[in-house]
Image (cartoon, rainbow, N blue to C red):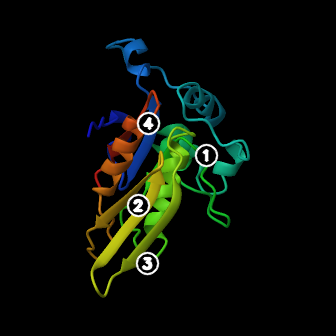
Amino acid sequence: MTLFVVAILVGAVLMFLRLVKKTDYAKAPVTSAKPILPATLEERLEVLAEVGFPLAPEFTALSLLESFDRDHLESSDYDAILFSLGSPEEREPWRPHCRTLWLFDTECIEGAGSYFDIADRMSELAGGAMPLADVVDHVDHEKSRAWLEYTFQNSKKHIDCKVKDDWVDSDIFSHFVEALANGDSDKIFIYGDTGG
């Protein structure tokens, strides 16, 4: 499994999952100069959209301000904006603010459906490059048993997951990385561990 840690994501409490094109790294210029940050939230959102982190079409900068303070989003580096983009809206239907970035809370295994939700979001992050079918999961905390099943490219996959309270079995992500790599895609998953 190949993982790249994005430096701008280090320092918060959760994980960010992001999908990029493999070729983007070859095109990235190398510079030692510190970049000048755009001043307003709207300008920063434009920059992030250009590099692959656009707001989902149903949201605007004002949507982020329902949950986050403008001064905070404009006074910090990009960490706060990435945090807000990676977070879902704070009411039903809990849609992601950005479809290419996920702020993932590793204490999320509450019962049946938890691994299903992870598979569904990973498939969405892949942007059509990793369509999963027949997704089913099972979580039984009392019997310390959990698993996820799905079909990808006409092949059924069964994954037994470790159970430790409500913590995700992080090995689950290696299966999605492998599926995406084996698919017909020029994309990879990367994550930034925010130190939580």
Q: 131 or 42: nearer the eye? A: 131
The residue where tag 1 is placed is 70
Alpha-carbon distance for marks 1 and 4? 40 Å
Left or right relative to 130: residue 46: right
Q: Regarding mark 4 in the picture, which secondary structure is present there?
A: loop
- Nearer to us: label 3 or label 2: 3
The residue carrying pointer 2 sits among few (fewer than 14), some (14 to 19) or many (20 or more) residues within 10 Å by Cα, namely some
Toward which corner of the image does residue 49 lie, by quadrant?
top right
Q: Residue at x 30, y 37 (%)?
A: 5
The residue carrying pointer 1 sits among few (fewer than 14), some (14 to 19) or many (20 or more) residues within 10 Å by Cα, namely some
Q: Regarding mark 1 in the picture, which secondary structure is present there?
A: helix
Q: Residue at x 50, y 62 (%)?
A: 135
The amino acid on which the numbered mark 3 sits, given as a three-letter code, is: Gly
Q: Which circle's residue, 3 or 2, is located before the other in the chain? A: 2
Q: Which circle's residue, 1 or 2, is located before the other in the chain? A: 1
The residue carrying pointer 4 sits among few (fewer than 14), some (14 to 19) or many (20 or more) residues within 10 Å by Cα, namely some
Residue at the bottom extreme, as displayed: 142
The amino acid on which the numbered mark 4 sits, given as a three-letter code, is: Gly
Q: Position of residue 28 (x, y in %)?
A: 41, 15
The residue where tag 4 is placed is 183
